Image (cartoon, rainbow, N blue to C red):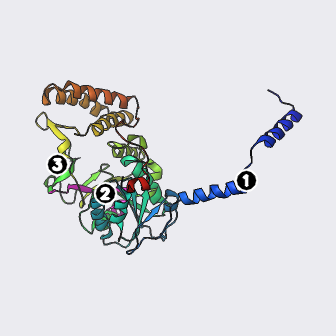
Amino acid sequence: MFVEWPVLQWALALANFIRPTRSLQEKMLENQVIAKALPRVSVSSSKKPPALLTPRLVATNSGCDSDQDAVAVVIVSRDRAIDLTKTLRAVCGQNVSRLRSIIVVDSSAEPEAIIQAATGFERVSIIRSAVNLGGAGAFALGLLSAIGTGASWIWLMDDDGRPADEGVLRTLLAVARKKNLAAIAPVVIDADDATRFAFPYPFRRRYIFFRREMSDDAFLASTAHLFNGMLIRSTAVFACGLPDLRLFIRGDEIDFMYRMRRAGLRFGTTATASFLHPSSNSELYSIWGGRLHVVYPQIAWKRRCQYRNRAYNFLRHGRWLIMAVDALRYPYFFLVHRRGDVAGLKEWLGCSWLGLRGKLAVDPEIDLTPVRDSEAAR
């Protein structure tokens, strides 16, 4: 449609005339509100509590030099202040000088407890999220913030996991340099039983559960439990992307691992370094004489996320054989092992169908209501 130029001029003039203008006092009031909304930032030390930082502030250069082995640590935390203290103590006790920053991504209902847990540890910064981002969202936020510090390496972990000894980071760096890897992970040991793995490993065409089944110098190529002590190059994140926020929990690191493989990144697990984490064995059920295992979380919403994300990942990444096996193992598990658990089978079918269709909406039981610091304090 053609509009005559004089008509357009009159229309613009009329719009400018009737548009409301803000007074100087209104603009000053708006600036004051914005200033109060921004958190104050201070440098953490042994005498001051760690600073609550916005992602924009964390992502600025924090003083990393040109050292190619500079490491930033990302710890995802939610309502586990005691565990966080243990993790920070183990991380700060590493016998390396390349540890540049420790970023805690926290979405706890009581942030004051997390601040208290992190007090006294050097180089710690806390990113406070008022919304529960899940493991996937929190690690994505932490990865971006760590990249922004200028560190060459990023060490990823939950607040309930920790390096087994003071030489873990040094060993991971040495193995990564020797094998020219984009990422390297330690073996994850049951925190309550040093003879068992916290999660089973695929090894020589079967899954193993005990530490004695793997040699001390073993290396598992292209497989790892990623967010439990994995050390990854910052540049590798640009190749495979960030964890998928939609997966929330259960399956986010599986998707990340498949994307690392698709990007052609060299990574793996080394048995020369160990990481402690609570075991998942309570969720594992063996069937057919131990030839196959079924993951069955006891918490309902975690179980639904497990089923949905598992189906989504295997379809997206073309894991047809595993999908075929799941079509046999889960009906057998519910109808035979659990003796006619038809409701459980329907739940698995329904959630898996959602995943196959790419329906990754947040589970209804997950509360995404923002929790402000003042609300948490009350």
Q: Amino acid at mark 2?
A: Asp
- Queried whether the magenta region covers residue 291, the answer comes back as no
Which of the pair 248/244 is nearer the observer? 248
Q: Amino acid at mark 3?
A: Phe
Q: Amino acid at mark 1?
A: Ser
333 versus 239 height, above or below:
above
Q: Position of residue 139 (x, y in %)?
A: 40, 52
For marks 1 and 2, give the CA distance. Answer: 49 Å
User: Sequence order check: which comes first, mark 3 or mark 2?
Assistant: 2
The quadrant holding residue 26 is: bottom right
Circle 3 is placed at which residue position?
Answer: 209
Which of the pair 85/177 is nearer the observer? 85
In the rendered structure, the answer to whether residue 193 lies left or right of residue 95 reads left
Q: Position of residue 308 (x, y in %)?
A: 33, 34
Q: Identify the magenta region.
A: 175-193
164 versus 252 height, above or below:
below
**Secondary structure found at label 2:** loop
Circle 1 is placed at which residue position?
Answer: 23
Q: Which mark is residue 159?
A: 2
Kindly tell me whether residue 322 is visible in this rendering: yes
